[in-house]
Image (cartoon, grey):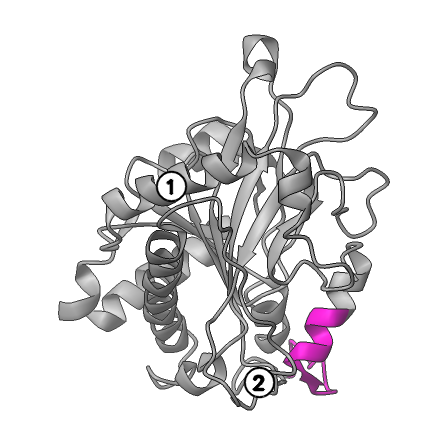
């Protein structure tokens, strides 16, 4: 199937259907994941005004002097919270660093919570007024939306609708505020984000004003992916791929460099990475291993151990 054929057949799935026909919505979503490797969701209910304000806060932060931004970098923290400088992250097995900088927002835990050792507290840039209300508020909206998507995935896999509720309760999910600066001069073989799969369960991705995102289809072809206005793209991460014995494989994607006049423009993006809780044991889910599709992951693995292993592979630990 050519890129044009794929894009002509690829249509957003309306989340409005979930309330009245949850199984129909789940089946439609599942078909998109299996056919294309990703899905787009419309009518998701996220507040556009809050999204726009969060993008504005991100742009304000990344425009701060380097010395100020470095104040929010935590050496040895794996990029889990706060600022990760430009040129720090490298995709697994890649030869060149990515051309990006980013900020991570995680879950706010109450004092004494059992996951304190695995989930660092958030940082709040004092220079940006209203950060916590806008940015952390959008994190919470994403978190609730992600659980709704997981409930549909559970139904599509033949599981009970609330199967994933406990697996992601107090999960180590993060929202990434991403800045790809203008590409000046010779990037030395680097692109904005080299081909990679996400570490987590599912990723919810808001569309960016600047193009560049490409997704690799099930047939191995790279296609441009710019979500329709008002839609969110959903892709599988490595954790859920492992849980499903690769029935739902992790989606490979990248962000290529701009050309022509667009090289002088920044690109901003805001993915939400939905994670299992740190002590969840990742193991093959019921019905995902058969005689024809034997269990590839017979050894269960603690979610936080899986996360740290992958963070070491991409240069953040």
Q: Of callouts 1 and 2, which one flags the residue occurring earlier in the amino acid sequence?
A: 1
Residue at the image point whose x is 83% and y is 24% from the top? 188
Q: Is residue 78 left or right of residue 214?
A: right
Magenta-drawn segment: 291-308
**To which residue does mark 2 refer?**
115
Residue 10, which numbered label? 1
Using a 10 Å C-alpha cutoff, classify the residue at mark 1 as few (fewer than 14 neighbours), some (14 to 19) or many (20 or more): some
Element carrying mark 2: loop
Q: Residue furthest right?
A: 95
Residue 144 in the image: x percent, y percent? Answer: 33, 68
Position of residue 172 relative to residue 95, above or below, is below
Q: Nearer the viewer, residue 168 or 164?
A: 168
Task: Specify the quadrant that holds the C terminus.
Answer: bottom right
Q: Which residue is the extreme one toward the left?
A: 20
Q: Nearer the viewer, residue 69 or 13?
A: 69
Question: Where residue 216 appears, x then y in whole percent?
Answer: 60, 42
| SS category of the residue bearing label 1 | loop
Q: Quadrant of residue 250?
A: bottom right
Q: Position of residue 149 (x, y in %)?
A: 36, 66
Alpha carbon of mark 1 to alpha carbon of mark 2: how far? 40 Å
Asked whether 36 falls inside the magenta stretch, the response is no
Where residue 213 appears, as percent x and y from the top left, is 54, 35
Q: Are marks 1 and 2 in contact (CB under 8 Å)?
A: no
- At 23% from the left and 71% from the top, the residue drawn is 22
């Amino acid at each position: 199937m050519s890129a044009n054929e794929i894009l002509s057949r690829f249509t957003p799935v309306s989340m409005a259907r979930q309330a009245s026909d949850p199984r129909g919505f789940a089946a439609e979503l599942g078909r998109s994941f299996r056919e294309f490797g990703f899905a787009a969701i419309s009518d998701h209910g996220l507040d556009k005004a809050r999204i726009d304000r969060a993008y504005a806060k991100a742009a304000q932060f990344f425009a701060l002097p380097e010395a100020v931004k470095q104040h929010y970098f935590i050496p040895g923290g794996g990029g889990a919270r706060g600022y990760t400088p430009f040129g720090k992250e490298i995709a697994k097995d890649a030869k060149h660093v990515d051309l990006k900088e980013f900020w991570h927002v995680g879950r706010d835990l109450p004092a004494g919570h059992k996951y304190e050792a695995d989930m660092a507290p958030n940082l709040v840039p004092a220079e940006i007024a209203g950060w916590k209300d806008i940015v952390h508020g959008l994190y919470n909206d994403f978190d609730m939306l992600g659980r709704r998507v997981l409930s549909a995935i559970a139904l599509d896999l033949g599981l009970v609708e609330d199967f994933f509720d406990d697996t992601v309760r107090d999960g180590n999910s993060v929202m990434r505020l991403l800045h790809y600066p203008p590409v000046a001069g010779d990037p030395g073989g680097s692109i904005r984000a080299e081909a990679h799969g996400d570490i987590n369960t599912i990723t919810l991705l808001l569309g960016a004003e600047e193009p560049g995102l490409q997704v690799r289809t099930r047939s191995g072809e790279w296609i441009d992916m710019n979500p329709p206005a008002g839609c969110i793209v959903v892709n599988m991460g490595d954790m859920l791929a492992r849980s499903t014995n690769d029935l739902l494989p992790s989606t490979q994607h990248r962000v290529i460099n701009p050309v022509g006049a667009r090289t002088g423009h920044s690109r901003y993006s805001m993915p939400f990475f939905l994670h299992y809780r740190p002590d969840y044991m990742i193991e093959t889910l019921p019905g995902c291993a058969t005689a024809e599709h034997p269990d590839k992951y017979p050894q269960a693995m603690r979610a936080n151990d899986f996360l740290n292993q992958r963070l070491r592979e991409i240069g953040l630990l």
